[in-house]
Amino acid sequence: MYRARPEDGVAFVTGASSGIGRATALELVRRGYRVAVTARREEELEQLAASAPEQIFAFPADVTNGSAMGGTVFTIEEQLGPIALAFLNAGVFLPAERVGFDAALIAQTYAVNVGGTVNCIAPLLAAMMTRGRGQIAINASLAGYNGLPGNLAYGASKAALIHMAEALKLTYESKGLTFQILCHGFVRTAMTDQETDFAMPWRIEPEAAATIICHGFEKGGFEIAFPWPLVAASKFVRLLPYPLRFRLIAAALRKAERDRTPEAAVNPSFPPVDGPTQS
Ligand SMILES: NC(=O)c1ccc[n+]([C@@H]2O[C@H](COP(=O)([O-])OP(=O)(O)OC[C@H]3O[C@@H](n4cnc5c(N)ncnc54)[C@H](OP(=O)(O)O)[C@@H]3O)[C@@H](O)[C@H]2O)c1
């Protein structure tokens, strides 16, 4: 399995204007990489690049624009050299999905989380295949393991990424390309800060996440998953037959809601949105 090294080329991080992407770009610099960063917010990217002018280079773009991402990958390679390691991290969670089924919101979430990732993979594959080596890590989420109420668009988009990464690994590993999937729990970022009344066990800081993530890039292995208690619980639940799985998830969600708001203890209709009531 190929594992990128700084002497092989540059690293490319999407969704680097804040949160996990930003922290990972900085951690990659500490590990010796020159890093090309992208996201839509130009000012944030420029500030990040200014913090390490010889090592971080800003290429603002919207991942939902396929031709723009093709151009971005081409320009990075032209200006900085081959991309050895790509961290496809750009993603959104739109809190309105907690309210109910919304087709436009689902399409929007898919456009960024799945479409945006695909738009990056296409030009990266073309470039890396000509060299016969390259490492691509995709940021999914533990949310991709199990369908949960209020998490339909986000969870399904992340499940799609897990599935896609599995197929990509099996297709391209023999050709020298390494694919990895990140399935991690809560990290303190703008994405989780927008959810004030939601319990987030084992939430860690982006810098701590970035250290684990970069260690995972170096170590290799298909999946980079943390923290282990949430990973173990998510994978265990996933193995259960549907009736048992749904009962367990519903009970866990009821307990979480009781802990959060005592009045929910007497509300038999929780969970309110598309609750897992059928097997
Ligand atoms: N935080 C968590 O607990 C957690 C847990 C599991 C997985 N994740 C995943 O981690 C990744 C990073 O999230 P985060 O927590 O660090 O949140 P964040 O701080 O909100 O970062 C999201 C990043 O994605 C970029 N982005 C969003 N839409 C984009 C678009 N259309 N084109 C280009 N870039 C776009 C944002 O940049 P611009 O707005 O500047 O474009 C931003 O840099 C996401 O894929 C998320 O699903 C997060």
Image (spheres, helix red, strand yellow):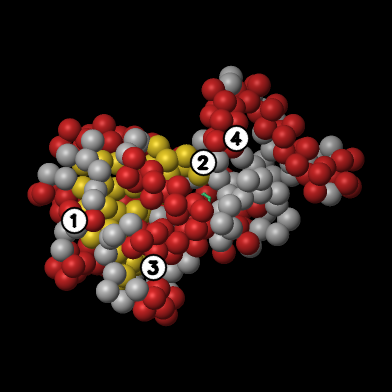
Q: Nearer the viewer, mark 3 or mark 2?
A: 2
Q: Which one is in front, 149 or 170? A: 170
- Choose the circle earlier in sequence order: 1 or 4: 1
Using the image, tell me which numbered label, if any, was put on residue 7.
1
- Choose the circle earlier in sequence order: 3 or 2: 3
Using the image, tell me which numbered label, if any, was put on residue 166.
none
Which residue is pictured at 66% across the width and 21% down the height? 244
Give the Cα distance between marks 3 and 2.
25 Å
Asked whether mark 3 lies closer than 8 Å to ligand 1, one says: yes
Which amino acid, mark 1?
Answer: Glu
- Choose the circle earlier in sequence order: 3 or 4: 3
**Does the image show residue 47?**
yes
Using the image, tell me which numbered label, if any, was put on residue 226.
2
Secondary structure of the residue carrying tag 4 is: helix
Tell me the residue that label 3 is attached to: 39
Residue 4 rendering spot, x and y as whole percentages:
24, 48
Up-down: is 238 above or below 262? above
Looking at the figure, which quarter contains the N terminus?
A: top left
Query: From the viewer's perspective, is 250 left or right of 87?
Result: right
